[in-house]
Amino acid sequence: MAAVMQHASAYLERFSSLQAGRDSEPNWLRERRELAMERFLRMGVPTPRDEEYKYTDLRALSDGRFLLSPDEPGGHARPAHLAGQRIAAACGDSLAVAGPAPPGIRVMSLSEALVRGEPRLEDRLASIASIERHALCALNTALFEDGVVIVAEAGADSREPLHLEFGPGRVARLARVLIIAERSSRVTVVETYSGLGEYWRNAVTEIHVSENARVDHVRAQLESPQAFHTGVVQAGQERDSRMSSFSLSFGARVARNDIGTRLDGTGCDCSLDGLYAVRGHQLVDHHTGIDHAMPHCHSHQLYKGVLDGNARGVFNGKIFVRRDAQKTDAVQSNKNLLLSDSAEVNTKPQLEIDANDVRCTHGATIGQLDADAAFYLRSRGIGEAEARKLLTYAFATDALARVGVASLRERFEGLLLDRFAPEAA
Amino acid sequence: MLRISNLHASVDGKRILRGIDLDVEAGTVHAVMGPNGSGKSTLAAVLAGRDGYSVDAGSVTFRGQDLLDMDPEIRAREGLFLAFQYPVEIPGVSMMYFLREAVNSIRRYRGLTELAAGDFIRLARQKIKPLGIDPGMLKRAVNEGFSGGEKKRCEVFQMSVLEPCLGILDETDSGLDIDALKVVSEGVNGLRGPDRAFVVITHYQRLLRYIVPDYVHVLANGRIAQSGDRTLALDLERHGYRWIEERSTALAAAGA
Ligand SMILES: Nc1ncnc2c1ncn2[C@@H]1O[C@H](COP(=O)(O)OP(=O)(O)OP(=O)(O)O)[C@@H](O)[C@H]1O
Ligand SMILES: [Mg+2]
């Protein structure tokens, strides 16, 4: 294995010891892991020299200590529970799946799925998210110890969210999720990430949405203020399928999310939405990618950000429209509210359009609280802090409206209000 | 109730109010008229505590306290209300939530218990009815997409819910048709009482047929150039502002 990166030995050591204990793993996975490790060692942890990480400095992670350490200083707080049925939780060095799953839905740990020889695992696991493009996805693939597999059987319809909670600990730090929605099924999955103290979580979720199926995916990043969070969510969609992704990003010192979908059939619909709210010295970076490979697909993106203190936001939205993808309709919008003079945002749409009969629109804004609106509220007796909170909430409300599950949306509203409550301001 | 003495104020270094004196006693209604740009809205904004105005001289006391020293929300909680000439649209905040928050902020300040949602809705419905506003408006975002007339009615509705001691109405009649004008005037008249006072800024004597003022003042070049009773408004309607402006310029020249 040609290892050129610095600190390679720490990763290699972990990898070798893990591989040695993976006798029961199928060959196809062992091989994928080998390949992934090789990729990672070739690329290393991204640095700001990499155009894709221009504003997001992950150099503190390069030696891997925040990821590989057996335990983290913060200890094992119970992961945050938001709403819906807690179906799986990872904490410490184990992952537990709690039944029973709704009719037509199978939920199991990855290790169990491998032992059982779950059909289609070979087709989907470590094959949707790209290890070529994402060094950190490659790292997860090489090192993950366990994860969660959710299969919605053909025709199954489950709207109550299935909640996956990733707390602290070795296993959860390399969270791995695979969601397979079979033909004409529907499933809603919520992932929560939370912890205490300083650690690095590097999570990967892969989603396969079969013909005419629908997946609603919500990701709540509520990591500790000292944590690093890197995550990849990648979906592949067959014809007439629908998928929605909502990324809530409130926690972590540095958070980087790569969220994408590939529209591989005609008549697909996808929405990638999100809300980030950061303050202090937090940095939150979202890179989205929508690959319109086939005609007659719709994509919708609305990302909103609220930034206070010295916080920094990054949004990069890539939309590819391939030559065959005529009649593509793609809308992208990123709006930011700066609550302080020292907060900053870098936002950039990136459109590559090779088809000629398409509609693609994009827009980005960065603004401050409307002083006239604040005065209007105050002139009615509403205090300054309260007015600010109200206007911040008002700013975020259309993004939050994209969360389809009402109970979850209300929790998020509460979290947002707490975050900019007078005490915290 | 309100005592303004020798008030001078400027915006961006531009002097706009140049020595206003005005006494408003409880139980009275004062109309303030005057040509465009004479400083009427500036006076209202300074009284309500809007940012961006600097008070260069003078004082304002409100119910015995230094008004200029208070934050805008404190002025409101002390009982001052400004009906805006141009009410602000606030997308994403419902009228209902906004107004309840306002009522409860004021109640907390005064040591009263907060109104529960149900009680507030009853209060709001009771106050909205006489103003001819569709109660569905309460669910809409504050002023968003309201017509000009709806916005003005809504200002009066807010005033009737908040029940201030001093209401300052900045051109609340502008852009209202005659029916709306009557409704709005009745709303204001319903609030009149021995413990309340109003400063009604208007260009039109028409309003003063419905809200009959005790005093009429004419603002010109940042000063009160003329005060009188309601017949002054009729004179202005007939002869315009020219004669007063000329007088005030002459006065300013003599004073300088
Ligand atoms: N922010 C500002 N910067 C500079 N000049 C201003 C500003 N705000 C108001 N002015 C000026 O102050 C003067 C008084 O304005 P004001 O709005 O108080 O007039 P008004 O009497 O209310 O007029 P109208 O009858 O048209 O409503 C005008 O000449 C106006 O252009
Ligand atoms: Mg005006």
Image (tube, rainbow, N blue to C red):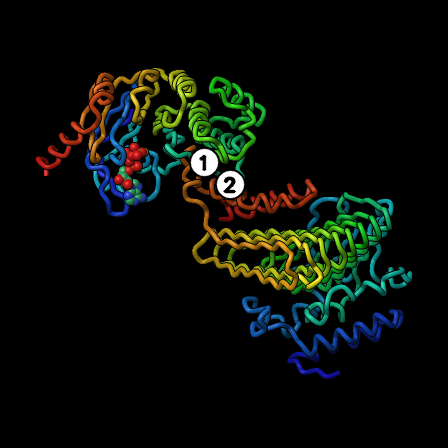
Query: Residue A148: horizontal and vertical position, in percent?
Result: 79, 57
Measured Cα–Cα span from mark 1 to mark 2? 10 Å
Depth check: give the residue in front, B95 or B47. Answer: B95
| Occupied quadrant, residue A292 | bottom right
Residue A261: quarter of image: bottom right
Using the image as rendered, state which of residue A297 and residue A110 is in the foreground. A297
Give the amino acid type for the residue marked by disc 2 in the picture: Leu
Q: Position of residue B243 (x, y in %)?
A: 16, 27
CB atoms of marks 1 and 2 within 8 Å:
yes
Q: Residue at x 53, y 28 (%)?
A: B137
Q: Judge by depth and name the residue closer to the eye, A301 or A351.
A: A351
User: What residue did someone put label 1 on?
Assistant: A382
Residue designated by label 2: A390
| A238 over A158 or under it: above or below | below
The location of residue A214, given as percent across then percent down, is: 77, 49
Please report, as a chain letter, where disc 2 is located: A
SS of the residue under disc 2: helix
Is A203 displayed left or right of A347 in the figure?
right
Q: Amino acid at mark 1?
A: Ile
Whether residue B111 can be seen here: no
Element type at marker 1? loop
**Residue at left offset 66%, top offset 79%:** A7
Looking at the rendered structure, whether the residues under marks 1 and 2 are on a common chain is answered as yes
Q: Is mark 1 within 8 Å of ligand 1?
A: no
Quarter of the displayed picture in which ligand 2 can be seen: top left
- Up the image or down, B146 lies above or below A154; here it is above
Label located before the other in sequence (1 or 2): 1
Residue at x-position 51% and y-position 32%: B95
